[in-house]
Image: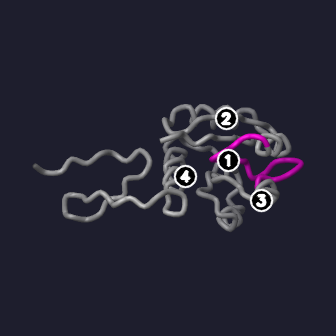
Amino acid sequence: MSCLRCLIVDDEPLARQLLAEYVGKVSFLALHAACASPLAALDILRTNPIDLLLPDVHMPELTGLELLFTLAHPPLVILTTAHSQYALQGFEVNAVDYLLKPITFERFLRAAHKAGDRRLSPAAAPLLPPHTGRAGIPVHQGWGAAAQSEPG
């Protein structure tokens, strides 16, 4: 299974650095680029396949939400911001998740797993029979799901 190619867009250097470190810690994510402006991100998006976009919502020139509105076919998106009032708008643009700064690695990891699962959703991947758990209940095997052993 291939990695999700990530593009980080944040005007704050420390936020870009932290997100890049987090991406580097997740085996199914690969950092393609990190840029300081949405305009630079647009240049990258025009010429490179990006699977997961991580834009800050509040930036000069163009907000992360405005960036999304310029894209005909946006990739998966995890919005980041220090402002909770944009959460509803984030979900209106079909964001996978919305991370409030300061972002912990645990919270980032949950959002990354949601992105991986969304990529594997029936619309994006062939249907596979579900894995059956101990009680005969189907168990979703998403990104990074631990293997379950069946009783012998």
**Between residues 102 and 29, which one lies in front from this camera angle?**
29
Residue displayed at 63% across by 37% down: 19
- Reading the chain from its start, which is encountered first: label 3 or label 4? 3
Predominant secondary structure, magenta span: loop
Q: Position of residue 78 (x, y in %)?
A: 63, 52
**Disc 3 or disc 1, which is closer to the eye?**
3
Viewer-nearest of discs 2 and 3: 3
**51 inside magenta stretch:** yes
**Residue bearing the label numbered 2:** 32
Residue at the front extreme? 126
Viewer-side label of 3, 4: 3
The residue singled out by tag 3 in the image is 72
Dot 3 crowding, Cα within 10 Å, few <14, some 14–19, many 20+? few
Residues rendered magenta in the picture:
47-65
Residue drawn at x 78%, y 51% as measured from the top left: 58
In this picture, is 1 found above or below 91? Answer: above
Q: Amino acid at mark 4?
A: Ala
Amino acid beneath label 3: Ala
Q: Amino acid at mark 2?
A: His
Q: Secondary structure at mark 3?
A: loop
